[in-house]
Amino acid sequence: MWIFGGSPEKEWTALMKQVEDAFYQRRYGELEASLSKAALIPAKFGDADERHAATLFKLAEHVQLMGDFDRADQYYQSALGVYENANGSSSESVARTL
């Protein structure tokens, strides 16, 4: 059962909206919690789903801003792997992650 009672895609979209709202309202604890939940959803879609990579990338940016550079690196590396699986190693999304 999905949190919002809809499809995984709708749940991911709703969580990412919560992330955006939390960011603009400076509720950073809520932002990280929503991102962590959102990262679990597209992982179920496979290793080549860009939503998964985008969520991991946002998590990396957030924890980096919070000063947790080791965890940020782990998220960036995970996002990079998903982007490479989705688009190949010479894609623009891979370049942005590097």
Image (cartoon, grey):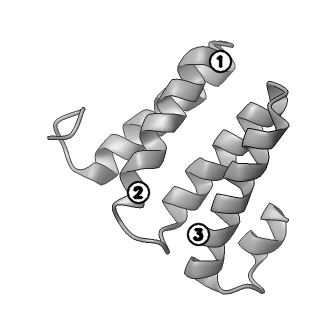
Residue 40: image x %, image y %? 41, 47
Q: Quadrant of the N terminus?
A: top left
Task: Relative to 74, say whether 38 is above or below.
Answer: above
Instruction: List the residue tagged with mark 2.
Output: 42
Asked where in the image residue 62 lies, by quadrant, the reply is: top right
Q: Position of 26 compared to 40: left or right?
A: right
> What amino acid is labelled 3 in the image?
Val
Instruction: List the residue tagged with mark 1.
Output: 28
> What amino acid is labelled 2 in the image?
Pro
3D distance between C-alphas at marks 1 and 3 = 25 Å
What residue is rendered at 65% in x and 60% in y?
Answer: 79
For mark 3, give the secondary structure: helix
What residue is rendered at 40% in x and 70% in y?
Answer: 46
Q: Earlier in the sequence, mark 2 or mark 3?
A: 2
Disc 1 residue crowd, few under 14, some 14–19, many 20+, Cα 10 Å: some
Instruction: List the residue tagged with mark 3.
Output: 82
Q: Earlier in the sequence, mark 1 or mark 2?
A: 1
Disc 3 residue crowd, few under 14, some 14–19, many 20+, Cα 10 Å: many
For mark 1, give the secondary structure: helix
Residue 89: image x %, image y %? 73, 85
Residue 21: image x %, image y %? 56, 23
3D distance between C-alphas at marks 2 and 3 = 11 Å
